[in-house]
Image (spheres, rainbow, N blue to C red):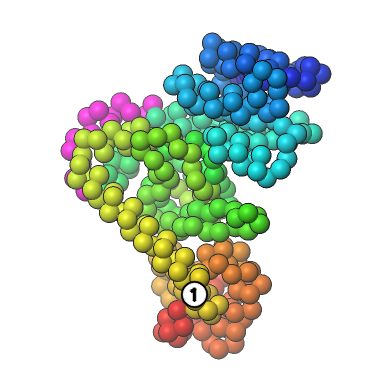
């Protein structure tokens, strides 16, 4: 039976929530304030912690910060349960490394779903780590990025994601690096107005998910499958071990990161200075390249994803694509886009 720690200073809410969780087959420990909760967490090492923010003795922010700095508790999934609903409060909690943030009042289904999701995720990551780490001690010398990708293929754990499913979310613990075996992944963030900005597109044979190899840095963006996607994952600790003993691979990975930064810079410059027609044409060509499609093959992609990458409003993108269709550059049927005149599209981009 999974063991949860509930830290909540409101006696009635604490007792009612504990009863709800026990009826869902969880073993529940409770604490009336952050200080006692932190002590229980270090002593009993629960499978997951649900914690209020505004509490006497020690608030929820201080609890998570203290547990994150302790090797024995730093990877325990942590969910905030709070009446604080302001965006800056949510962002502060997620930046500290919380796995989820549920606002009061909440439904039973919402809380149980969040707990089950986080426990399932930590179970997958644990399986990946257990499968890969014993092998990594004898991986032999790796010289190139292809050698590294072959290591992922041979020793990583395969995970599948449906179209639209999050692979990880901004603020999650960055425990796993992924190699795409099949599919397409977008990485994205929300700006202060809540508008989605796509920061990267990753296709088959791309590596993604790396943040820091020296610190416990959470994911800085959300990754979502925009097609049915198959990934193979290796734990961050395993990759650190490989880079420590295979300096040639480290240099190649640095070159890859440099190219990623250059691509991001070029994308930002394009978004800042390009016309709407040029942004739209460039983005369609970029998706065709990432999807490895020939010009005569249809690209199936949502208008929102196209607009997010192009950095323009969805309505503006739709109007621009309609004009491309009238000019005989594209054929459009539902979500399917087929390039008819690729040279003309390139001349616009």
Please tell me which residue is depicted at 63% across the width and 69% down the height of the picture.
313
The image shows residue 221 at horizontal and vertical percentages of 51, 48
In this rendering, is residue 295 above or below 104?
below
Q: Nearer the viewer, residue 244 or 319?
A: 244
Q: Position of residue 198 (x, y in %)?
A: 52, 59
Residue furthest to the right in view is 12
Q: Give left or right: position of 205 versus 2.
A: left
Q: Position of residue 107 (x, y in %)?
A: 77, 33
Q: Residue at x 20, y 42 (%)?
A: 247
Q: Is residue 59 left or right of residue 276?
A: right
Where is 24 relative to 341, above or below?
above
Foreground: 83 or 1? Answer: 83
- The residue shown at (48%, 32%) is 124
Residue extending furthest toward the bottom:
327
The answer to whether residue 259 of the structure is visible from this angle is yes
Q: At which x and y percent is residue 42?
A: 53, 14
- Relative height, residue 49 to residue 236 (above, below): above
Q: Is residue 50 visible?
A: no
Pick out the residue farthest to the front: 57
Left or right: 248, with 300 as reference point: left
- The quarter in which the C terminus is drawn is bottom left
The answer to whether 246 appears left or right of 45 in the picture is left
In the image, what residue occupies the spot 65% across and 25% down?
Answer: 59
Q: Which residue in the protein does label 1 denote?
A: 273
Mark 1 surroundings: few (<14), some (14-19) or many (≥20) residues within 10 A: few
Q: Say if the magenta span includes residue 256.
A: no
SS under mark 1: helix
Asked if 234 appears above or below 5 in the picture, the reply is below
Tell me how many marks there are: 1
* Range shown magenta: 130-144
């Amino acid at each position: 039976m999974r063991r949860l720690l509930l830290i909540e200073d409101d006696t009635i809410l604490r007792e009612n929530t504990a009863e709800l969780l026990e009826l869902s087959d969880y073993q529940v420990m409770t604490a009336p304030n952050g200080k006692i909760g932190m002590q229980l967490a270090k002593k009993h090492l629960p499978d997951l912690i649900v914690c209020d923010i505004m509490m006497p003795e020690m608030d929820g922010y201080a609890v998570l910060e203290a547990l994150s700095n302790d090797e024995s508790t730093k990877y325990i999934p942590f969910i905030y349960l709070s009446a604080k609903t302001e965006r800056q409060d949510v962002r502060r909690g997620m930046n500290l490394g919380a796995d989820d943030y549920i606002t009061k009042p909440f439904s039973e289904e919402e809380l149980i779903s969040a707990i089950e999701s986080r426990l399932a995720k930590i179970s997958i990551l644990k399986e990946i780590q257990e499968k890969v780490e014993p092998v990594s001690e004898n991986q032999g010398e790796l010289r190139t990025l292809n050698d590294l990708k072959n290591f992922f293929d041979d020793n990583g754990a395969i995970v599948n994601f449906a179209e639209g499913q999050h692979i990880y979310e901004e603020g999650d613990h960055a425990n796993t690096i992924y190699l795409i075996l099949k599919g397409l992944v977008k990485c994205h963030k929300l700006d202060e107005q809540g508008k989605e900005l796509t920061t990267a597109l990753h296709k088959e044979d791309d590596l993604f998910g790396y943040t820091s190899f020296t610190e416990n840095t959470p994911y800085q963006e959300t990754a979502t499958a925009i097609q049915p996607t198959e990934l193979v994952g290796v734990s961050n600790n395993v990759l650190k071990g490989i880079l420590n003993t295979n300096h040639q691979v480290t240099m190649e990975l640095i070159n890859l990161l440099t190219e990623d930064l250059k691509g991001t810079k070029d994308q930002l410059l394009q978004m800042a200075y390009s016309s709407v027609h040029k942004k739209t044409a460039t983005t369609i060509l970029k998706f065709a390249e990432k999807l490895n499609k020939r010009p005569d093959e249809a690209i199936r992609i949502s208008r929102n994803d196209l607009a997010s990458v192009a950095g323009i409003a969805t309505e503006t993108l739709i109007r621009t694509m309609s004009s491309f269709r009238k000019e005989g550059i594209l054929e459009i049927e539902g979500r399917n886009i087929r390039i008819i005149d690729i040279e003309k599209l390139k001349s616009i981009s």
